[in-house]
């Protein structure tokens, strides 16, 4: 353990350190969950500096400047250097760490383009590095056993442990000491796990670092987001955002680009056909081709009269087990990752094993899916906030309402895998069509053929219904015998 010791706070923004650090060094990308979200995994750690004037204290505020929109939090573990470190080997590095605490590495994505990677302005604002509220003695903890958690307005949004780091904490100290002297009081921000996203004025962000199963904790670091009244002037680079910055700020996972030669599974022309085709007719045509097990049973729409057509994105829940929910249910879990990455025209299909004893989504997730352009959700489980979900306008086919939270029955396990929903197997990319009669799954290779055949049959059935409505008997008319088919075809030619 080093000789650095915290004293009573003195000076603006000293936090639990008692004095401002000489240097704040932050790691760009360090957790596997965050790397997966960003779609890139670094071979070695990389860093940037933050000014010491960015230090903030628990209970303080962080300002989102006027004219900006993308202020994001990043809950992190902060290391406080205790003794001078230069050319330190990894197995000796922890001896130079005095303390561990919680940090929030706020960043303004509106200025990332201007910074071009340096993060000087996007991460350097006053109060953008709150620390504390307490210090954990580094001698009392194993650096591989620490946990960081973040809450926004009381909801847990980030949770990971140092076991999820790509690089161990010791490596940061050793690596940096090769390049410059680490001095007592210097702070290393060790990166954030998945779950970082945009916050708005009035939001309260809380970060805690602890050792699970013990009383060892930094305490909870509280920061309230406030709205600034001053805008940046034209004496420097102006805030600028685009779709890429919005996606990274909100935490949308990276997606692979489709091969150029791949045609979309659901063209606009095919989508238009399927919107016209009734599910009952599609089911009949699938049955004619030997596909009898493609109906998702037991689900009804929350918006009667709604129609969904889209390609499947899948989410699998496994039965709740307390230890598994602890490791997979919190933070930026599989459920949140899917609802945060669903694309325009896609349908989220959830395997809930027909278990209606808890919700499988609620109004917040429905709002996010609706904002991203999802065509709908199909779940063979329940829905929380049923009326509020309906008010979002997002069509959801489910077993009906249930007030219980997800963790009562389910653990969100994985996404974009084969799932079983309402007795039907659904693969990612399958075409999902739903209306008041139910929901069917159509293999993409058959979709065009099925749609065309269904529309032909629908025209025929409409004509037959007209004849029956005029008093003709059903015998020979439904289905058409040769005489009635000749009459039908003659009517078609006239049309």
Image (tube, helix red, strand yellow):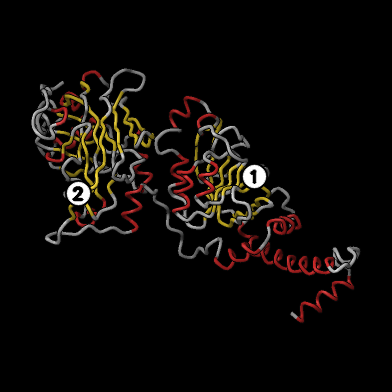
Residue 469: image location, x then y, percent: 83, 66
Q: Is residue 33 above or below residue 280?
A: above
Residue 36: image location, x then y, percent: 38, 44
Furthest residue in direction bottom, as rendered = 494
Camera-side residue of 33 and 227:
227
How packed mark 2 is, by other alpha carbons closer than 10 Å (few <14, some 14-19, many 20 or more), is many
Q: Quadrant of the N terminus?
A: top left
Query: Relative to residue 19, is residue 482 drawn left or right?
Result: right
Q: Which residue is mark 1?
A: 299
The quadrant holding residue 234 is: bottom left
| First-in-chain label (1 vs 2) | 2
Camera-side residue of 386 and 9:
386
| C-alpha gap between disc 1 and disc 2 | 49 Å
* Mark 1: secondary structure: loop
Q: Which residue is mark 2?
A: 119
Q: Are marks 1 and 2 in contact (CB under 8 Å)?
A: no
How packed mark 1 is, by other alpha carbons closer than 10 Å (few <14, some 14-19, many 20 or more), is many
Which residue is rendered at x = 46% and y = 46% of the image?
Answer: 339
What number is the disc on residue 243? none
Residue 403: image location, x then y, percent: 54, 34
């Amino acid at each position: 353990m080093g000789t650095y010791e915290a004293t009573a706070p003195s000076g603006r923004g000293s936090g639990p350190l008692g004095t401002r650090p000489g240097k704040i060094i932050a790691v760009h990308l360090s957790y596997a969950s965050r790397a997966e979200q960003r779609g890139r995994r670094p071979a070695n750690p990389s860093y940037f500096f933050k000014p010491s004037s960015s230090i903030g204290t628990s209970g303080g505020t962080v300002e989102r400047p006027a004219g900006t929109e993308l202020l994001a939090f990043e809950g992190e573990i902060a290391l406080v250097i205790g003794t001078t470190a230069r050319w330190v080997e990894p197995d000796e590095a922890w001896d130079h760490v005095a303390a561990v605490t919680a940090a929030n590495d706020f960043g303004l994505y509106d200025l990332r383009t201007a910074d071009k990677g340096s993060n000087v302005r996007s991460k350097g604002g006053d109060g953008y590095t709150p620390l504390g509220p307490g210090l954990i003695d580094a001698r009392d903890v194993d650096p591989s056993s620490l946990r960081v958690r973040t809450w926004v307005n009381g909801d847990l949004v980030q949770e990971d442990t140092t076991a999820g780091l790509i690089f161990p904490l010791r490596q940061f100290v050793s690596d940096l000491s090769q390049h410059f002297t680490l001095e007592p009081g210097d702070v290393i921000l060790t990166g954030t796990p998945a779950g970082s996203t945009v916050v708005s004025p009035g939001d309260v962000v809380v970060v805690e670092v602890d050792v699970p199963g013990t009383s060892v904790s930094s305490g909870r670091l509280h920061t309230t987001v406030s709205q600034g009244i001053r805008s940046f002037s034209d004496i420097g680079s102006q805030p600028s955002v685009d779709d890429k910055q919005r996606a990274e700020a909100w935490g949308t996972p990276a997606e692979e680009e489709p091969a150029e030669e791949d045609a979309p599974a659901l063209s606009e022309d095919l989508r238009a056909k399927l919107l016209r085709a009734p599910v009952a007719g599609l089911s009949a045509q699938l049955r004619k081709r030997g596909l009898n097990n493609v109906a998702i049973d037991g689900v009804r729409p929350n918006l009667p009269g709604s129609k969904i057509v889209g390609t499947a994105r899948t989410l699998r829940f496994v039965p709740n087990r307390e230890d598994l929910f602890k490791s997979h249910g919190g933070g930026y879990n599989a459920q949140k990752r899917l609802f945060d990455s669903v694309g325009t025209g896609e349908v989220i299909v959830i395997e809930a094993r027909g278990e209606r004893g808890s919700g499988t989504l609620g109004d917040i997730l429905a709002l996010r899916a609706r904002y991203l352009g999802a065509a709908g959700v199909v779940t063979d489980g329940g829905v929380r906030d049923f009326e509020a979900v309906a008010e979002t306008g997002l069509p959801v086919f489910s077993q009906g309402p249930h007030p219980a939270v997800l963790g009562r029955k389910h653990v969100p396990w994985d996404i974009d895998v084969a799932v079983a929903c309402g007795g039907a197997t659904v693969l990612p990319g399958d075409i999902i069509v739903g209306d008041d009669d139910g929901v069917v799954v159509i293999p993409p290779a058959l979709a065009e053929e099925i749609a065309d055949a269904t529309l032909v049959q629908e025209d025929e059935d409409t004509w037959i219904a007209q004849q029956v409505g005029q008093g003709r008997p059903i015998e020979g008319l439904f289905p058409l015998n040769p005489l009635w088919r000749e009459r039908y075809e003659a009517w078609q030619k006239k049309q």
